[in-house]
Amino acid sequence: MPTSRGKIRWWDLFFIALNAYLGLSIVCFVCVLAGSRLYLAMGYGADVDAFITASFTNFYFTQLFEAGFCLALLLATRRMVRKRRGRGSFAGYFRPIGGRRLLYAALSGCGAAGVVVLVIAVLWSPVHWHYHRKAAEVIGQPHSLGQLAIWGLIAVVLAPITEEMFFRGLLLEWFQQRLARLPAALITAAIFALWHFRFLQAPGIAGWIATTEIGALGLLCALWAQRAQSLCAPVAAHAAYNATLTLTLAALLLTMA
């Protein structure tokens, strides 16, 4: 990872996250303005709770939030990197690597996703995933191939670039300035897993299993970032992981159609 021209400081990371949430707040404000008009048009009357529930289970509404946060985080990260290291330094994190190494990184992401699918298949009945209906009620899930394509675009393109730049770029670099490589990778993987809040979205063992799986992906991406000295490898692994899960969901949708 690039370390020249000014080290990243802990308050840089804090302000990047803060700016990302501020950007999300702007998106929320715009959605509230639009939603207030829809609220009157859809005839919910005084039942505000019903309208909020309907909004947060709407696929397009939730994807707008997801994309808005990713874009805000990416722009805040880019601004901070350019401020510390000058123009062009953002692209320096994505140093070109060999095609073979890029392929191996992508295959490792596919393999990790395959393990996740296998774990879910084995533990579906014992863990009682379907009991956690509250998680499904607050997250709009794709119910058609068109919606799945939108979800995949965000999950396979936007999210990997954004998250890898922040977690395996700046955050991992900050820890590596203070710790050995393996502890730095493990800590950033744990932060990455907790950042997704799966343990809150799916209370109980199911949520913690999902959190552990995300942590394993974070560790895989961190090790690739350290080995390749470029974010191209972890982005490839992350994108392949999300793409494999998206294609698995697409197969399930086609089966149930």
Image: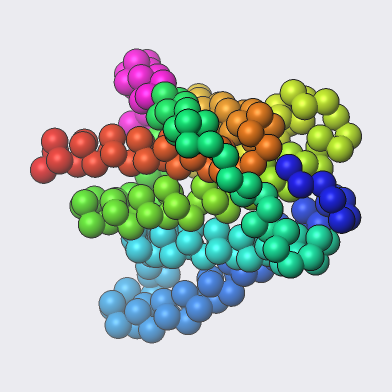
Residue 201 in sight: yes
Residue range corresponding to the magenta coloring: 113-131
Q: Residue 119 or 51: which is nearer the viewer?
A: 119
Q: Residue at x 48, y 31 (%)?
A: 100
**Is residue 250 shown above or below 104?**
below
> With 2 as the anchor, is 149 left or right in this view?
left
**Is residue 148 shown above or below 78?**
above
Q: Say which quadrant the C terminus sits in.
A: top left
Q: How is the image coloured?
A: rainbow
Q: Residue at x 68, y 58 (%)?
A: 90
Q: Residue 134 or 87: which is nearer the viewer?
A: 87
Q: Position of residue 44 (x, y in %)?
A: 32, 74
Which image quarter: residue 246? top left
Q: Residue at x 63, y 66 (%)?
A: 75
Q: Residue at x 86, y 38 (%)?
A: 177
Q: Main secondary structure of the magenta part?
A: helix
Q: Position of residue 77 (x, y in %)?
A: 69, 59
Q: Position of residue 73 (x, y in %)?
A: 62, 60
Residue 18 in sight: no
- Residue 78 belongs to the span the image colors magenta: no
Q: Residue 181 or 141: which is nearer the viewer?
A: 181
Which image quarter: residue 212? top right
Q: Position of residue 59 (x, y in %)?
A: 34, 58
> With 256 as the anchor, is 99 left or right in this view?
right
Residue closest to the far front: 98
